[in-house]
Amino acid sequence: MLLTLSTTHRPATDLGFLLHKNPARAQSTSVSTGVAHVFYPEADDDRCTAALLLEVDPIGLVRGSKGPSSEAFSLGQYVNDRPYAASSMLAVALGKVFASARRGVSKERPELVDSALPLEIHLPAMACRGGVEMAERFFAPLGWQVHAAVIPLDETFPDWGSSRYVDLRLTGDQRVADAVNHLYVGLPVLDDAKHYWVSNDEIDKLLRAGAGWLADHPDRDLITRRYLAHKGSLSRQAIPRLAEVDDAEPDALDDATAPSATAVGHDGADAAEADRPVPLAVQRHGAVLAALRSCGARRVIDLGCGSGALMPTLLSEPAFSEIVGVDVSHRALEEAARRLRLDCMPERQRSRLTLLQGALTYTDSRMAGYDAAVLMEVIEHLDPDRLPALEHAVFAAAAPATVIVTTPNVEHNVRYEHLPAGSMRHRDHRFEWTRGQFADWTDRVAERHGYDVRLLAVGSDDTEVGPPTQMAVFTRRPQQQTVPADTSPRPAAEGAA
Amino acid sequence: MTGADHAPEADAPEDSGPQPVRPAEISIPDLSLVVLIGISGAGKSTFARAHFRATQVLSSDFCRGLVADDENDQAATPAAFDVLNYIAATRLRAGRLTVVDATNVKREDRAKLVQLARDHDVLPVAVVLEVPEALAVQRNANRPDRDMAPGVIHRQRADLRRGLRGLSREGFRKVHVLSGTDQIAAASITYEKQYNDRREDIGPFDVIGDVHGCSAELEQLLVELGYQLWPDEAGRPDDAVHPQGRRAVFVGDLVDRGPDSPGVLRLVMGMVAAGHALCVPGNHENKLVRALRGRNVTISHGLETTLAQLQTEDESFRKQVEEFCYGLVSHYVLDGGNLVVAHAGLKESLQGRSSGRVRDFALYGESTGETDEFGLPVRYPWAKEYRGRATVLYGHTPVPEPEWINNTLCLDTGCVFGGRLTALRYPERELVSVPAARTYYEPARPFLPQGEAAPELDVPARRDPELLDIDDVLGKRVVETRFAGRVTVREENAAAAIEVMSRFALAPQQLLYLPPTMSPSATSQLPDLLEHPAEAFGYYRSEGIAQVVCQEKHMGSRAVALVRRSDIDGAPERPVSDRGALHTRTGRAFFADAGLTTAILRQLASAVEKAGLFDELRSDWVLLDAELLPWSAKAGDLIRNQYAAVGAAARAAVPAAVNTLEQAAGRGLDVGDLLTVQRERAADAVAFTEAYRRYCWPTEGLEGVAVAPFQLLAAAGATFHDREHAWHLSLVDRLVSADPQLIRRTEHRFVDVTDPVSEAAATEWWTSMTAGGGEGMVVKPSGNLTKGRRGLVQPGLKVRGREYLRIIYGPDYTRPANLERLRQRNLGRKRGLAQREYALGLEALERVARGEPLWRVHECVFAVLALESEPVDPRL
């Protein structure tokens, strides 16, 4: 990957003193990810250009001494844009090779250190999520003129569109130290991807480098968020491996804890309620709590608890003596444990709570015997073909006295302006039901498994399209009639008993 | 335990009750809880050491040591017994003989052990060691570690004396008292096999459902099964013999309700006596015995009929019937433990056990305590939860037609109620049945749908229980496979797989198989290549295989197609178990678009129909292993976001670097080496882009999509991994002829790896194919499934082309320094994984073919997925 920094300051060769690199010869420095070469393709009084070429050795990196787990990488690490596109790796190299320049020290030209010089930066391929507009948003407020051209993915397949790389040129009068620092922070932020081969320590350093001027940046929230989003994302490999077995992208299956930003509609859906006093998610929690209170439940199981969104609500209710969260994703449960600060929870509190990995398409004796089960925004994440298995596992096998189910009301989707017509609220939703469809399902389930059911609205109940969320509360009939499910064997007659 | 009313359990039908005996020879059931009883110093531990394995003996002293570091710390006694009980329970659950070495002189201590034995349905046996008190005192005095007050032993002896007479009343099924050191020293132990244990008897059997006095139907069925009836002097059949030595096994309920219970009894009793049949008791036999013995029973439910019929027989026959029915053993474990026959079925934890509970379950099943709308008790559906290894065959509950439920099958098809009398041939698992001549008895609850005749039975209906339990998949699992023995799935792999399986995969009913991973050939010795056919040929040659087939590796994605005849014109809403499926290596739907899936399955099913395969295979479905093209149809996102992106970045960055370096060189800077490298990289970037572009072409619906099947995995009741690849490829050719538009041929070459000319020709073929950018080929043993010197031979080795491998190893993997390092790749793990996944896949297919329950198939399929999350080099 390549970066060039040019100046038309006179004499332009003063750039060498500011960068602490002699224009007369090429130099190489070893950095954590490869070898950084600095050389000057042009160096005269009118114009001087320093080039930083980082030669990355991907094979060496992946095969490097990373211990016994070195085979546990994903294919993505081999066929990776990192050796070519300017990103966090280049930033790290930049930080090392131009360390003195970044600090703004120059023995030979101390007077130039604080002067703004006419500078031009060129990055022929910079990873930039959000494209030209994002590059503009980042660099323009820092005083740069931004010329960015997006690079097509593959000219043979024009309908594939643009790549996430831009050919970036920045021009402006800047201190050299500032220019280096802007890139140092900007490259990983604009890249907004996993920091392959760059340690979290180094990422933290990048963030600190922006300490002074980032505070004034109009997009500082976005910048910080992008940093934090990708920290530590290398450690988990099992699920990405399974995705790659299918020639899917590594992240395609690993979305159990994905932030709602990846959701097409959730963010939008809940945000649409933002002008109301209480967000929809909070209203949902409240409605679930009310239903649990009304049935007098003490032992509650949250099926499909995800990263534990409902848990604080449940924990805050002293009447619940036992709270169990079940989710199929191990990662989600780890996230829940972290968010709930399980390891520093007082013992009495801690003893009320259990997190279990389990799948609702399998019967599970650990799920049996609870007063109430909550399925909050869960069923719509299951393929319709798998719903009968869930019905059996929950209503026939676990058979709690009360089952609370919430799911989106698709009729309400028209009220979400940002949601394209016909699309669902979340990328992983396999279906969204109208009120009629939900009522049909709840009636059928209740009938088959010996429950009574009542339906409730969650969120503002729009006269035309109904509430955003619909909720069903199933109550097991006291004297269970043996109405066998289609799948259960008929306990047939035996004469002489 | 056995109630006073019941016939005693099978261990001692001739023995009217346990009594203290004083033999030097102690006989013990081979599965029992042996309780040693004796005062301290009686020599219990010495006795135990002499007669049992150290691991069978649990001593209270030893357990005290475990919990308190001191075998004599009496304060640790309660904790020590906790440990002892835990270990004993664990052993008994696993069906292991266990000996408790403690004084056990107090009644309450023994009561706990009797209860423990009952809880695990094993027989408690007491072995009492009596020595003179003085000897015991002296022995204790000689033991330096033991400081026992003199009164203790005296009290123990008093306790023991008090309890001795009542031991059998306490529940011990056998009591052995050894008095004096001589008798103790001379004692020897013999083991009795349990009466239900007939594991050495491997059949073949014809297991026959509830007869209920329908003698005509029974005779007809036996004839149908190939038996020859032998009449007695009065011309009534009292034996039946099968020319091939097959034997009948009756599941009980021979009598009551029907027209001729004595006739049925005469035939069955004769067959059993002659060794031509086995019989387990039904609840009706149990009640008949009690009635014949003059016990107070309600004469109802057809018993009145039997008693009336027996009145016309002579007294000696009645006596024989009474003895026969009394002597019946609650259940049998047959065929090495693979088959269990019990009247009302038997759950796994009770199989091969002996207790009143076992007998009750075997005779009556388990009641939920509820009654249904006809006033009959609701049976607990034990079969739905059954996960045992043994096939369980039973009757008791009339069903319209037999249905396999988790490896169990009810054979009572209600003959006496106008249904059929049914037998299952074992191990063939074929049903044979004859219809009832008429309805002899109206059932309390109709068991056939109103107005319907009993259905014809050819194949047992396969229940679709949709009942998978989390314990079938989660945690550390061991799957028994026919071809690779026990395959272990690690807990963390299962944890990763459960998420993918339950969130993304198709319904388990549609997921009969997942393809195994495939290893590449060993790394080539040639300077410019990583892979070359020579190593693949060499591998098979060294495994002793001469004939291999090289199959073109298509540039697509792996797809497994479950093609059902009903896919041709079936309604899209039909149940999931009746719909075909097209899925990926991890069990996900190949196309997100359901309409596209339906369309492609319809076309595939039509092709299979047109090629005549459904008829020829006598199956309404086939399972095909295939490649679906183009790669971009499935991997579009991956190609765009990963491969195309890398190419775009490389083609933008590297030429710019070359430019800049040329400028610098022009200034006289010494950047020559760097420039050379960057120029090479620029060329590599172009080659890389070319490489992935070959696998991409636009598709519109089915337009542009091709399916290249290369193997027929399974059809109803059959697997085909033992058929040569030539056979599979000829089937494929027929499919291609049926639909050349959609279905693509797999080019192939047969090679004799002991003939250099033959090898060279195939190598030449590979070279020309890959030089044009082809992905490469897969080399397989021509004979398909092959066992080599150490287990299964790899079913295939891929030999990938030099250009294609850029997609896998990165654009500039071909640079000499990179190749040098990449040669050090470790294939061992990949090979091992490929072998285990292959065995699991075959196991899944065979279980499907045998009609095994869903969880048994799913277990294997799930294990393949779990193994796929093993960390191995993904480029292999």
Image (tube, rainbow, N blue to C red):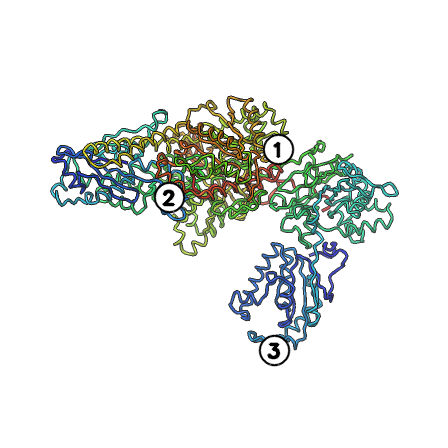
Name which residue type carries label 2: Arg
Where residue A484 sits, quadrant-wise, is top right
User: Distance of mark 3 from mark 1, alpha carbons?
Assistant: 77 Å
Is residue B875 shown to the viewer in this render?
yes
**Mark 3 vs mark 2, CA separation in Å:** 74 Å
Q: Secondary structure at mark 3?
A: helix
Specify few, some or many for label 3: CA neighbours under 10 Å numbering under 14, 14-19, or 20 or more: few
For the C terminus of chain B, which image quadrant? top left
Task: Indicate the quadrant where residue B678 lies.
Answer: top left
The structure residue drawn at horizontal position 87% and vertical position 40%, both measured from the top left corner, is B235
Pick whichever, B41 or A256, lies toward us. B41
Residue bearing mark 1: B716
Which chain's residue wears label 1?
B
Mark 3 chain: B
Q: Pinpoint residue B1: horizontal percent, then vertical percent.
A: 68, 57
Residue A309 seen by the camera: no
Q: Which residue is mark 3?
A: B150
Secondary structure state at the residue bearing disc 2: helix
| Tag 3 near tag 1, CB within 8 Å | no
**Residue at the front extreme of this rendering:** B756
Residue indicated by mark 2? A63
Which residue type carries mark 1? Ala
- Comparing labels 3 and 1, the label whose residue is closer to the camera: 1
Please state which of residues A225 and B607 is positioned toward the viewer in this rendering: B607
Label 2 neighbour load within 10 Å: few <14, some 14-19, many 20+:
some
